[in-house]
Image (cartoon, rainbow, N blue to C red):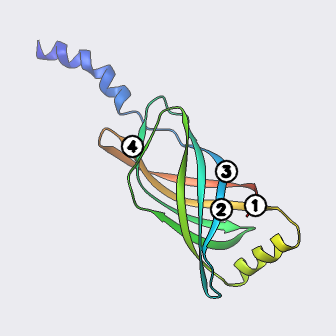
């Protein structure tokens, strides 16, 4: 009887352990300068994603390097647990310290020159999963982004 019971639960176990697919990047909103200094500044924003999975997932940690127009802009670390609903849009709060080197000053000059679109590149990894099983999922995105402060 135990063998029959095991085979009855095998399809459920197989579906429950399916690897989650990646999230679809939607964009950045609510960009704010939290602290402005000539050496280091702090910027916060909300990064939008869509979860195409048929089940909710949990994100435990995310690390992302941000590049603006192919120049390193900053590093962001999200070290908290976030529950992400299935087939829904969600926004991650991001805060990063930016070294106000030539890259950040160049971005400010670009914005001051009237250019409202830059190329954003995100590279990193996130720890996502469900039911106690987590994997490191790569984060890779590159595309145009309209900025509005």
**Image quadrant containing the N terminus:** top left
Binning the other alpha carbons within 10 Å of mark 1 as few (below 14), some (14 to 19) or many (20 upward) gives few
Binning the other alpha carbons within 10 Å of mark 2 as few (below 14), some (14 to 19) or many (20 upward) gives some
Q: Is residue 42 above or below residue 32?
A: below
Report the disc number at residue 129. 4
Q: Are marks 2 and 1 in contact (CB under 8 Å)?
A: yes
Say which residue appears at 74% left-offset and 81% top-offset.
105
Residue 95 x, y percent position in the rendering:
54, 66
Q: Are marks 1 and 4 in contact (CB under 8 Å)?
A: no
Residue marked by disc 1: 148
Say which residue appears at 65% left-offset and 73% top-offset.
72
Residue 41 x, y percent position in the rendering:
60, 79
Task: Kindly report the distance in space between the C-alpha atoms of the residues bearing marks 2 and 3.
Answer: 11 Å
SS label for mark 4: strand
Is 8 situated left or right of 64 in this image?
A: left
**Mark 2 or mark 4, whichever is nearer to me:** 2
Task: Kindly report the distance in space between the C-alpha atoms of the residues bearing marks 1 and 3.
Answer: 12 Å
Looking at this view, name the residue that lies furthest to the bottom: 39
Task: Kindly report the distance in space between the C-alpha atoms of the residues bearing marks 2 and 4.
Answer: 28 Å
**Mark 3 or mark 4, whichever is nearer to me:** 3
Residue marked by disc 2: 31
Q: Is residue 11 above or below residue 99?
A: above
Task: Kindly report the distance in space between the C-alpha atoms of the residues bearing marks 2 and 1.
Answer: 7 Å
Residue marked by disc 3: 27
SS label for mark 3: strand
**Mark 1 or mark 4, whichever is nearer to me:** 1
If you read the primary sequence from the N terminus, does the residue marked by circle 3 or circle 4 appear first? 3
Binning the other alpha carbons within 10 Å of mark 3 as few (below 14), some (14 to 19) or many (20 upward) gives some
Residue 121 x, y percent position in the rendering:
67, 61
SS label for mark 2: strand
């Amino acid at each position: 009887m135990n063998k029959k019971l095991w085979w009855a639960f095998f399809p459920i176990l197989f579906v429950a352990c399916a690897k989650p697919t990646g999230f679809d990047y939607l964009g950045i909103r609510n960009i704010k300068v939290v602290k402005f200094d000539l050496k280091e500044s702090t910027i916060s924003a909300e990064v939008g994603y869509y979860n195409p999975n048929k089940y909710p997932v949990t994100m435990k940690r995310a690390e992302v390097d941000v590049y603006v127009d192919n120049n390193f802009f900053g590093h962001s670390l999200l070290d908290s647990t976030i529950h992400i609903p299935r087939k829904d849009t969600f926004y991650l709060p991001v805060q990063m310290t930016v070294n106000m080197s030539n890259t950040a000053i160049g971005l400010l000059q670009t914005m001051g020159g009237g250019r409202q679109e830059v190329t954003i590149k995100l590279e990193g990894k996130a720890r996502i999963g469900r039911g106690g099983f987590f994997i490191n999922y790569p984060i890779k995105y590159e595309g145009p982004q309209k900025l509005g402060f």
